[in-house]
Image: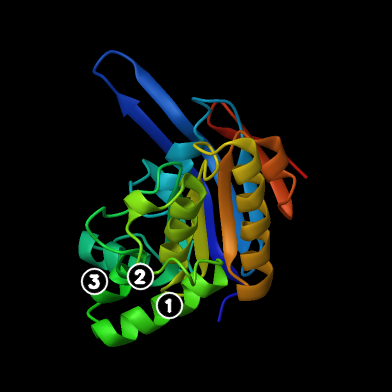
Amino acid sequence: MTDFALQASHLSKHYDDGVNRIDVLVDVSIAIARGEMVAVVGASGSGKSTLLHALGLLDLPSSGSITVTGQATDGLSEAQRSRLRNHALGFVYQFHHLLPEFSALDNVAMPLIVRRESREHARSEAQKVLELVGLQARVQHFPGQLSGGERQRVALARALVAKPACVLTDEPTGNLDRHTAQQMFRLLKQVNAEAKTAFLIVTHDQELAALADRRLYMEAGRLVDAS
């Protein structure tokens, strides 16, 4: 088993409108160890979200290679990329994207149901991870009955239920007030420590980034510094 949850080498991404070429990612290399928490910090438009989408196999880079839990992704079909993404990666966004007609329990169980695991097993695993994020008393509530912070915790639980090697988060506290954001900060660190899940956190929030094991700084599509 590789020691890295996620690796990328010399990633570039550009768009061509027929007149101008726009470089969004420029020769980006990154490796995230299993159980490591890495923050990517940068201003809006610096390429952070594009990097996350490429690393999450949601978008193809123009050049470069990506390896997920030791498996090279070059040449994979869309179905194969989707299968690898479902088994090895989890996602949390600024907006929770929960299904309003389903309970918290069934929202969290959904990735396992999509994987064609039994509904009974999926709900059992969902119950466990909702307990991990402190929502054992809210499992039958619908998203509209939950606070903003609770909805983000459900989204985190959904990202964790399939036991991914790495969870990729895009501004996970950007839609929360400061107090609730701080609670989310602590929860991410707790899950990272207890579940040994790697995290890649894309954020402009320096307080959240300070919790990470490493901070990478993005500017004009390049990773320019690390700590």
Rendering coords of residue 160 (x, y %): 47, 68
Q: As rendered, which of 176 and 42 lies closer to the eye? A: 176
* Residue 16 seen in the current view: yes
Q: Residue at x 78, y 45 (%)?
A: 227
Q: Nearer the viewer, mark 2 or mark 3?
A: 2
Q: Residue at x 47, y 42 (%)?
A: 51
Rendering coords of residue 5 (x, y %): 55, 67
Q: Dot 2: what SS?
A: helix
Q: Is residue 103 left or right of residue 69?
A: left
Rendering coords of residue 209 (x, y %): 69, 44
Q: Nearer the viewer, mark 1 or mark 3?
A: 1
The kind of residue tagged 3 is Val
Q: As rendered, which of 52 and 225 lies closer to the eye? A: 52
Q: Against 224, is 195 above or below?
A: below
Q: In which quadrant of the rendered view does residue 72 lie?
A: bottom left
Q: CA distance from mark 2 to mark 1?
A: 7 Å
Q: Is residue 199 left or right of residue 47?
A: right
Give the label on residue 93, or none: none
The kind of residue tagged 2 is Leu
The residue that label 2 is drawn on is 105
Rendering coords of residue 136 (x, y %): 49, 72
The residue that label 3 is drawn on is 114
Q: In terms of sequence position, does the residue under pointer 2 or pointer 1 come before the other?
A: 2
The residue that label 1 is drawn on is 127
Total numbered badges shown on the rendered structure: 3
Mark 1 touching mark 3, by CB under 8 A? no
Q: In terms of sequence position, does the residue under pointer 2 or pointer 3 come before the other?
A: 2
